[in-house]
Amino acid sequence: MNRQIEILLVEDSPADVRIAEEALVDAGINVNLHVVCDGEEAVKYITQQAPYADSQAPDVVLLDLNMPRMNGHEVLEEIRNQHNMKDVPIVLLTASESSHDVEEAQRLGMNYYLRKPVEARCLGELLQVVQTLWH
């Protein structure tokens, strides 16, 4: 039996959180979804700082690029600086039309990206691929 995949969703838009939740349900993926609403909370989560001292390291990170307090590029860099997070797949979610944003994210270690608005079907298909590769 496959264990649940731990997914960290870093997203400040409640509508986009709902889309991700729908995609996971529709895809039938066995996941434990953790949601944080900004970059600083994401860093606390991955470094197990309060209030996330008991958090499990995510198997996949879904990361919004444009967030308050700390943007996706900064979070991505922090994630890749964590020894236990170097190989974790990171999916960047962005509304940006700038090729520079995507290139910078690739340089920092992003694995995949999806342009917003993200359709639940597309996100579900990507997560099924990640699940297949992960198992």
Image (cartoon, rainbow, N blue to C red):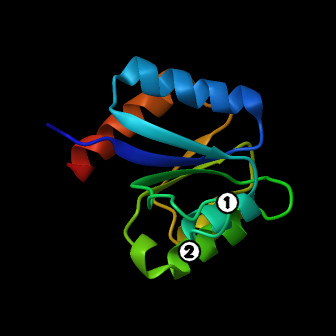
Residue 26 rendering spot, x and y as whole percentages: 42, 18
Nearest to the observer: residue 100 or residue 82? 82
Q: Please say whether residue 10 is visible from this viewpoint.
A: yes
Q: Element under label 2? A: helix
Badge 1 marks a residue whose secondary structure is loop
Please state if 27 lies on the left or on the right of 7 as rendered.
Answer: left
Give the crowd class for mark 1: few <14, some 14-19, many >=20 residues within 10 Å: few
Name the residue type under label 2.
Answer: Arg
Q: Residue extending furthest right?
A: 69
Is residue 22 depicted above or below 71 in this figure? above
Q: Residue at x 44, y 56 (%)?
A: 58
Q: Mark number for residue 107?
A: 2
Disc 2 crowd, CA 10 A, few/some/many (<14, 14-19, 20+): few
Q: Residue at point 44% right, 58% down? A: 56
The residue beneath circle 1 is 51
Q: Position of residue 123 (x, y in %)?
A: 49, 32
What amino acid type should be assigned to the residue bearing mark 1?
Answer: Pro
What percent of the width, then of the height, locates residue 8?
A: 53, 49
Question: Which corner quadrant of the image does residue 65 belong to?
Answer: bottom right
**Circle number at residue 74:** none
Q: Earlier in the sequence, mark 1 or mark 2?
A: 1
Q: Is residue 89 above or below residue 104?
A: above
